Amino acid sequence: MKIKVPSKLIITLYVVTALFWVMFVVSTKYTGTLEGWKFDYLLKPFLLGMTLLPLIGGIIGIKNAASWGGHKTVMGRSTLALGLGMIAWAGGMVIWNYYLFFTTVSVPYPSVADAIFVLSWPLWTYGILQLSKANGIKFALRKMSKAIFLIPLLVILVSIYLLVFMARGGITYDNPIKLFFDLFYPLGDIVILSVTASVYFALRKFLGGIYKTPTLILLFGFALNYFSDFLFSYTTTKGTYFNGHLADFLFTTTMFILSLGLSMITPDILDLKNSGAIE
């Protein structure tokens, strides 16, 4: 598949953002200081790139959705939901950056940023399900062993331990709003990884054509998002997280991968006639 201009833009932005992160890490020697020129000239550009990647990816996704026919088609619904999920994640980063750039207080938890971040989870889940439908998951499931349905159960059991007990140190009940986010974040991660894993194992022998690569890229991106959130939650619980941490770089890489995959799902008139994407 030929790399088009939107994909090149995303790749370029990611490379520049990653370079700022590397320079920040080297200059601070993993201390995570936010003082002086390191914050203004290294961390700020990194955080801006971390915000722009999902924003641009989301806009591209919405544009592609319109080209697919919008909500009237499977691929239109998929790219629209995925794009909106990316924009929601970027919106959370805007609030996060506001606290860092314009206030002297630490980003509170929970905050308005969390309320925006969590909008991504249901949108992404719906987008993945629609994408799997476009790739023929119904046919694939008929050919699969019933053992595939054990995959979500395994993911749920492992995730409860990793995301709830290990990463977050359990669930606290002293604040109803905090309790909601303490439950919603791991639940969202569990649902997305369960759906992603199930879709991958169901479709791995059936994926083909020009959309095999972007589909696999998106599935890998959602798997990486799971581990990024685990590392972020674990380090914040242990008190070792700082802005510019490896967790932030993993989130940035996740947004790059998702944006890249989304930018590659563009319709082609000749393929529309023979693909099962249009209903």
Image (spheres, helix red, strand yellow):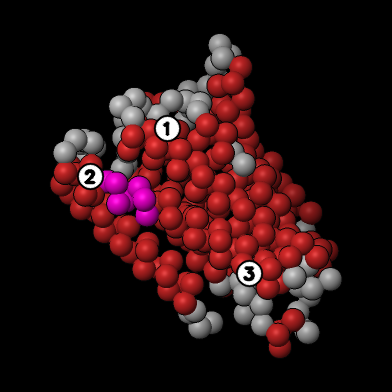
Amino acid found under the numbered disc labelled 1: Tyr
Q: How many neighbours does mark 2 have within 10 angstroms: few (below 14), some (14-19), or many (20 or more)?
A: few
**Who is closer to the viewer here, 212 or 272?**
272
Q: CA distance from mark 3 to mark 1?
A: 36 Å
Q: Could you say whether the residue bearing mark 2 is in a helix, strand or loop?
A: helix
Q: Could you say whether the residue bearing mark 1 is in a helix, strand or loop?
A: helix
Residue 169 at x, y percent in the picture: 48, 23
Residue 180 falls in which quadrant of the image? top right
Residue 252: in sight, yes or no?
no
Residue 201 falls in which quadrant of the image? bottom right
Q: Do the CB atoms of the residues marked 3 and 1 lie less than 8 Å apart?
A: no
Mark 3 or mark 1: name the one nearer the start of the chain: 3
Residue 40 circle label = 2
Residue shown at 56%/65% (left/top)?
Answer: 60
Q: Which residue is mark 3?
A: 64
Q: Which residue is mark 1?
A: 234
Mark 2 or mark 3: name the one nearer the start of the chain: 2
Residue shown at 43%/73% (left/top)?
Answer: 8
Amino acid found under the numbered disc labelled 3: Asn
Amino acid found under the numbered disc labelled 2: Asp
Residue 232 falls in which quadrant of the image? top left
**Who is closer to the viewer here, 24 or 150?**
24
Mark 2 or mark 1: name the one nearer the start of the chain: 2
Please, which residue is most extreme toward the top here? Answer: 174
Residue range corresponding to the magenta coloring:
43-49
Residue 62 at x, y percent in the picture: 62, 62
